[in-house]
Amino acid sequence: MSEFSFFRFRSCGLLTDEEVDHMTEEVLNAGGQECDDSISKLSVSELKGLVEQVRELRACLPRS
């Protein structure tokens, strides 16, 4: 996730503290901005739906 995308989700209050902590490291390591254009065009309700889908997918993954 690029820095722009991260701050778009964060400024809309869509991330938990745990997600912010985890994603901060990912953002610092991200090299591309492939999704910025798409993220910038989404409404807050669409962003919220995207976050909910990601959380559902993560819930299905085995814990390491």
Image: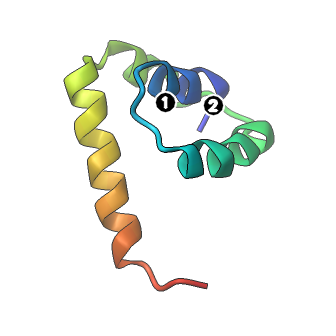
Q: Are marks 1 and 2 in contact (CB under 8 Å)?
A: yes
| Cα–Cα gap, marks 1 and 2 | 8 Å
What is the secondary structure assignment of the residue under circle 1? loop
Q: Amino acid at mark 1?
A: Cys
Q: Is residue 41 above or below residue 1?
A: above
Q: Is residue 22 above or below residue 34?
A: below
Residue designated by label 2: 2
Residue type marked 2: Ser
Q: Which mark is residue 35?
A: 1
Residue 53 x, y percent position in the rendering: 27, 52
> Could you tell whether 11 is left or right of 32 in the image?
left
Quadrant (top left/top right/bottom left/bottom right) for the C terminus: bottom right
What crowding class fits label 2: few (fewer than 14 Cα within 10 Å), some (14-19), or many (20 or more)?
many
Image quarter of the N terminus: top right
In this view, 23 is above or below 33: below
Horizontal and vertical percent for residue 16?
48, 44
Residue 20 placement: quadrant: top right
Q: Position of residue 26 (x, y in %)?
A: 70, 47
